[in-house]
Image (tube, grey):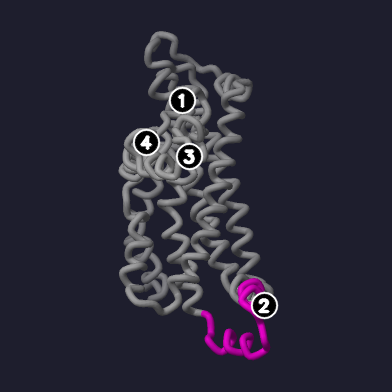
C-alpha cells in the first residue's frame, strides 16, 4: 500500500533536519551533562586520587561561602547598572542620530564602532589608554583641570567595568532604538506637534511608548550577555582589588583555573545556568505580554 504524499514529505523533512538537530543536541547536552556529573564529584586536579561521589556537598560548600553571595550581588549590580546606562544612552543617541545633520552617516558609523571591538581589546584600551592613572586620557583631563587624578580600576573597579561594558553595548541599543524610531509614522508626530505638545510631552507620550517593545528586546538580549561578562573583569581588575569586582563568572573561573577545583566550579556553573534561565524566562514572558497588548505599548 503506497504512503500518502504528505506522509512521505514529512519523513523526508525529518530525515533532512535530523543530523543538524542531533549535532545541536549533542553540542548542548554533553557539556551540561559533564557539568552536572562533576558538580556531584569531589574532583580537584591537584589531588586526583581523592576523586569520588559527594552528592550535593559542592553545592553546600558553595552556598555557605560568603564570597559566593557577595559575587552574586555584584553580578546583579553589574547587570542592572549596565542595562540602565546602555538603555538611557542608547535612546539619547538614537534620537540624535535620527535627525538630519551634516556628516550623519559618518557619525552613525563612529557610534556603532565600539560594538565591533573585541571585549579583551576594549578592556585593554580603557585600562592602558584611558583609565591609567599616569598615562591615561582621563588622568590628563583631570590634572589639566586642577582636579585630583583618579585611579579608576583601583578606587572604582565596578564602576570602571560598567563604563567599559556600557561603551561596548550602547551602540547595540542605539541601533535597535534607531530602527524602531524610523518605523514610527510621521503623521503621528505631526499630529502631536499640531496639538501643541512640547518636546517632553512628545517624548513621554509618543516616543517612549513606541520604543517599549524595542526596550524590552534590548533588555532581554543584553541581560543574558551581561550575566556572562568575564573578559573585561579578567583583563582590567582580575576580580580585585581584593574581591571588589569578583562576580559569579569570575568565581567560577577562580575555582576551576586557580584552585583547580573542578567539582566546585561545576556547581557554580550550574548556578549560573539556572540564574540565566530564570532571567530569560521572566524576560520572554515580559516580551510575550507586550506582544499580546499592542494597544497598551504602542
Marks 2 and 3, the one that precedes in the sequence:
3
Looking at the rendered structure, the secondary structure element under dot 1 is helix
In contact (CB < 8 Å): disc 3 and disc 1: no
* Residues shaded magenta: 184-204
Question: To which residue does mark 3 refer?
Answer: 147
Position in image of residue 131 (x %, y %): 39, 39
Question: To which residue does mark 4 refer?
Answer: 132
In the picture provided, is 260 more to the left or to the right than 78? left
Residue 238 falls in which quadrant of the image? top left
Q: CA distance from mark 2 to mark 4?
A: 50 Å
Looking at the rendered structure, the secondary structure element under dot 4 is loop
Marks 1 and 4, the one that precedes in the sequence:
1
Residue depicted at 42% across the width and 59% down the height: 171
Question: To which residue does mark 2 refer?
Answer: 295
In the picture provided, is 21 more to the left or to the right than 219? left
Position in image of residue 200 (x %, y %): 64, 73
Q: CA distance from mark 2 to mark 3?
A: 51 Å
Marks 2 and 4, the one that precedes in the sequence:
4
Residue depicted at 36% across the width and 68% down the height: 108
Q: 64 or 92: which is nearer to us?
A: 92
Looking at the rendered structure, the secondary structure element under dot 3 is loop
Q: 29 or 169: which is nearer to us?
A: 169
Position in image of residue 110 (x %, y %): 33, 62
Q: CA distance from mark 3 to mark 4?
A: 15 Å
Q: Overall secondary structure of the magenta stretch? A: helix
Circle 3 packing at 10 Å, graded few (<14), some (14-19), many (20+), is few
In the picture provided, is 202 more to the left or to the right than 186? right
Circle 1 packing at 10 Å, graded few (<14), some (14-19), many (20+), is many
* Quadrant in which the N terminus is drawn: bottom left
Looking at the rendered structure, the secondary structure element under dot 2 is helix
Question: To which residue does mark 1 refer?
Answer: 38
Amino acid at each position: 500500500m503506497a504512503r500518502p504524499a504528505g506522509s512521505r514529505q514529512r519523513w523526508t523533512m525529518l530525515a533532512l533536519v535530523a543530523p543538524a538537530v542531533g549535532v545541536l543536541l549533542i553540542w548542548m547536552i554533553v557539556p551540561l551533562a559533564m557539568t552536572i556529573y562533576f558538580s556531584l564529584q569531589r574532583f580537584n586536579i591537584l589531588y586526583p586520587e581523592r576523586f569520588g561521589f559527594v552528592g550535593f556537598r559542592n553545592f553546600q560548600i558553595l552556598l555557605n561561602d560568603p564570597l559566593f553571595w557577595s559575587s552574586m550581588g555584584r553580578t546583579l549590580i553589574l547587570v542592572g547598572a549596565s542595562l540602565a546606562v546602555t538603555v538611557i544612552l542608547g535612546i539619547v543617541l538614537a534620537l540624535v542620530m535620527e535627525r538630519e545633520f551634516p556628516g550623519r552617516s559618518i557619525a552613525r558609523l563612529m557610534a556603532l564602532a565600539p560594538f565591533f571591538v573585541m571585549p579583551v581589546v576594549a578592556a585593554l584600551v580603557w585600562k592602558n589608554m584611558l583609565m591609567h592613572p599616569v598615562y591615561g586620557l582621563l588622568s590628563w583631563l583631570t590634572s589639566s583641570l586642577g582636579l585630583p587624578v583618579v585611579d579608576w580600576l583601583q578606587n572604582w573597579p565596578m564602576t570602571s567595568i560598567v563604563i567599559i561594558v556600557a561603551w561596548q553595548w550602547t551602540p547595540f541599543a542605539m541601533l535597535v532604538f534607531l530602527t524602531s524610531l524610523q518605523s514610527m509614522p510621521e503623521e503621528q508626530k505631526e499630529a502631536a506637534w499640531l496639538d501643541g505638545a512640547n518636546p517632553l510631552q512628545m517624548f513621554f507620550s509618543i516616543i517612549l511608548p513606541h520604543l517599549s517593545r524595542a526596550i524590552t528586546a534590548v533588555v532581554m538580549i543584553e541581560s543574558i550577555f551581561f550575566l556572562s561578562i568575564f573578559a573585561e573583569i579578567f583583563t582590567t581588575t582580575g576580580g580585585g582589588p581584593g574581591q571588589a569586582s569578583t562576580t559569579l563568572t569570575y568565581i567560577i573561573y577562580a575555582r576551576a583555573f586557580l584552585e583547580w577545583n573542578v567539582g566546585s566550579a561545576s556547581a557554580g556553573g550550574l548556578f549560573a545556568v539556572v540564574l540565566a534561565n530564570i532571567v530569560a524566562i521572566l524576560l520572554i514572558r515580559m516580551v510575550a505580554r507586550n506582544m499580546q497588548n499592542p494597544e497598551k505599548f504602542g
